[in-house]
Amino acid sequence: MKLLASLTSPFVRKVRIVMAEKKLDVDLQIENVWAPDCKVQETNPLGKVPCLVTEDGGALFDSRVIVEYLDTLSPVSRLIPPGGRERAAVKCWEALADGTLDACVIIVKEFQRPPAQQSPEWIARQYGKIQAALNAMETTLGEQAFCMGVNYSLADIAVGCVLGYLDFRFPHIVWRDDHPNLARLYKKLATRQAFIDSEPPRA
């Protein structure tokens, strides 16, 4: 299998962490989706990463679809419950985390526009989403060891990718001060080898 990826994408990082936790061997192919010679669109019509090229030449895109598939490939470290309320809860955590990342990416891209074309109202709206999501995660996590209680799951990976991306792109958001439960969780997640190995390059 081959993963078309960017080392700074939090959605790619989620997939890479799942691969590492599942002990799956995947060829990482770095792509710059903004480069004129990028060929991602030949595999993913949306021209986005991550995109997983399977052994039969097929393609899977969107991180949620990819991790769902990857979790079926190995019995090691089952990350998504097979069904019922627990599965829905894990996927809800993931949806909340991914939605937060969507707001983050919108802000990053908005600030790349010329200042005269930026919308302060639109940026403020995205910051509001981030704050509301962090508050919801903090409350729902509570004193639990992990998002789903005692078991490490995709929910923790998704949330960890959000918190790591905030540190990477939004150091001015001092999220730990108002969210001690999330800070405790992230401190634990950051020691896992899969998180260490997928840290985005700072240079």
Image (spheres, grey):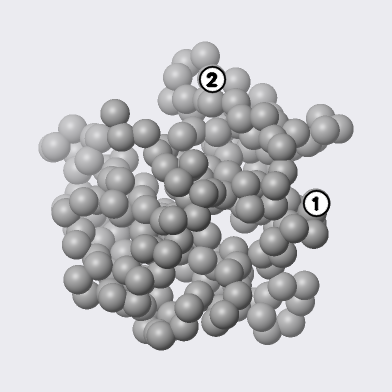
- Asked whether residue 194 appears in the rendered view, the answer is yes
Q: Is residue 178 above or below residue 169?
A: below
90 horizontally vs 105: left or right: right
Q: Residue 200 at what x, y percent from top left?
A: 40, 39
Q: What residue type is labelled 2?
A: Cys
Residue 160 image-quadrant placement: bottom left
76 horizontally vs 4: left or right: right
Residue drawn at (72%, 64%) of the image: 78
123 or 67: nearer the eye? 67
8 horizontally vs 60: left or right: left
Judging by the rendered image, the residue that carries numbered circle 1 is: 73
Q: Which quadrant: the C terminus?
A: top left
78 or 47: nearer the eye? 78
Disc 1: CA contacts within 10 A as few (<14), some (14-19) or many (>=20) = few
Q: Which mark, residue 132?
A: none
Q: Residue 202 at what x, y percent from top left?
A: 31, 34
**Mark count:** 2
Residue 122 image-quadrant placement: bottom left
Q: Residue 24 at what x, y percent from top left?
A: 72, 43
Disc 2: CA contacts within 10 A as few (<14), some (14-19) or many (>=20) = few
| Secondary structure category for the residue under label 2 | loop
Judging by the rendered image, the residue that carries numbered circle 2 is: 38
Residue drawn at (31%, 40%) of the image: 109
Query: Which mark is nearer the camera, 2 or 1?
Result: 1
Residue drawn at (75%, 58%) of the image: 76
First along the sequence among labels 2 and 1: 2
Q: Which quadrant: the N terminus?
A: top right
The span from disc 2 to disc 1 (Cα, nearest Å) is 29 Å
